[in-house]
Amino acid sequence: MVLFTLIRHGQSVYNSQNRFTANVDVELTSLGEHEAQGNTLCLK
């Protein structure tokens, strides 16, 4: 059996400003970094 998990990234600077990023690589906010770290714990 294969397990396929999709995870959305944490909050980015553009997300917090309600801006559309398209193909721009935008940094995560401190909240976004915390969310991403929490996701790694869920996958272990």
Image (cartoon, rainbow, N blue to C red):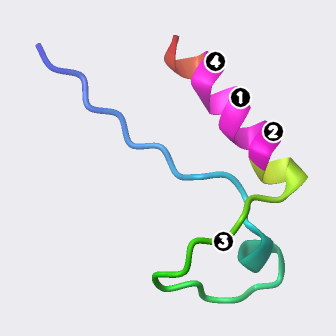
Q: Is residue 34 magenta?
A: yes
Q: Amino acid at mark 1?
A: Gly
Number of the label disc, if any, that sits on residue 26: 3
Please tell me how crowded label 4 is: few (under 14), some (14-19), or many (20+) other residues with Cα within 10 Å.
few
Residue placed most toward the observer, 14 or 26: 26
Marks 2,4: beta carbons within 8 A? no
Mark nearest the camera among 2 and 3 is 3
Tell me the residue that label 1 is attached to: 38
Where does the magenta region start and end? 33-41
Residue 19 against residue 42 in the figure, above or below: below
Residue matched to label 4: 41
Residue 33 appears left or right of 8: right
User: If you read the primary sequence from the N terminus, does the residue marked by circle 3 or circle 4 appear first?
Assistant: 3
How much space separates mark 1 and mark 4, taking CA atoms? 5 Å
Q: CA distance from mark 1 to mark 2?
A: 6 Å
Determine whether 4 is above or below 1 in the image: below
**How many other residues sit within 10 Å of disc 1, few (<14), some (14-19) or many (≥20)?**
few
Mark pair 2, 3: CA separation: 16 Å
